[in-house]
Amino acid sequence: QVHLVESGGGLVQAGDSLKLSCVASGLAFSRYAMGWFRQAPGKEREFVAAVTNSGAYYDDSVEGRFTISRDNAESTVYLQMNSLKPEDTAVYYCGASEFVTVQSYEYDYWGQGTQVTVSS
């Protein structure tokens, strides 16, 4: 059974940093593209970043502020978030996909999410 467990969310002020982690189990982690998405109240889940073994991809809204990385030995994907803004407030989810994609419906597995709240 596949499990993705996110952690690291919290309440911070604008300009602060947070680092999210997502630990995977029950899947061949190194074979999957891993993505981070977020969902704010009343909005659809949106792409934030994705990482494969050969590259990283970002939404324009986080490019230059967020960094995604992965540790295949630990089956973990990270999202370093710097210069946080109030509009970054959302529940952040990690997902696993057989190929890199920005479309949430193409991800096979999801975690339960971790709340990030940025105050102004």
Image: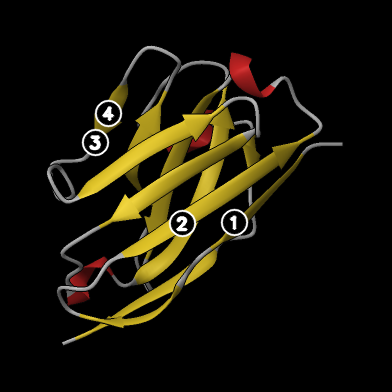
- The residue located at (53%, 66%) in the rendering is 114
Are dots 1 and 2 in contact, CB under 8 Å?
Answer: yes
Which percent across, then down, holds residue 61? Answer: 14, 50
**Residue 20: assigned label:** 2
Which is nearer the eye, 107 or 63?
Answer: 63
**Labels 4 and 2: the sequence-earlier one:** 2
Are dots 3 and 2 in contact, CB under 8 Å?
Answer: no
**Labels 3 and 1: the sequence-earlier one:** 1
**Labels 1 and 2: the sequence-earlier one:** 1
Is residue 45 among what the camera can see? no
Which percent across, then down, holds residue 20? Answer: 46, 56
Q: Give how far apart the Cα atoms at labels 4 and 3 are.
A: 4 Å
Q: Nearer the viewer, mark 3 or mark 2?
A: 2
Q: Amino acid at mark 4?
A: Tyr
In this figure, which residue is indicated by the disc labeled 1? 6
Q: Amino acid at mark 3?
A: Tyr
Q: Secondary structure at mark 4?
A: strand
In this figure, which residue is indicated by the disc labeled 4? 57
Q: Give how far apart the Cα atoms at labels 4 and 2 are.
A: 17 Å
Number of marks present in the image shown = 4
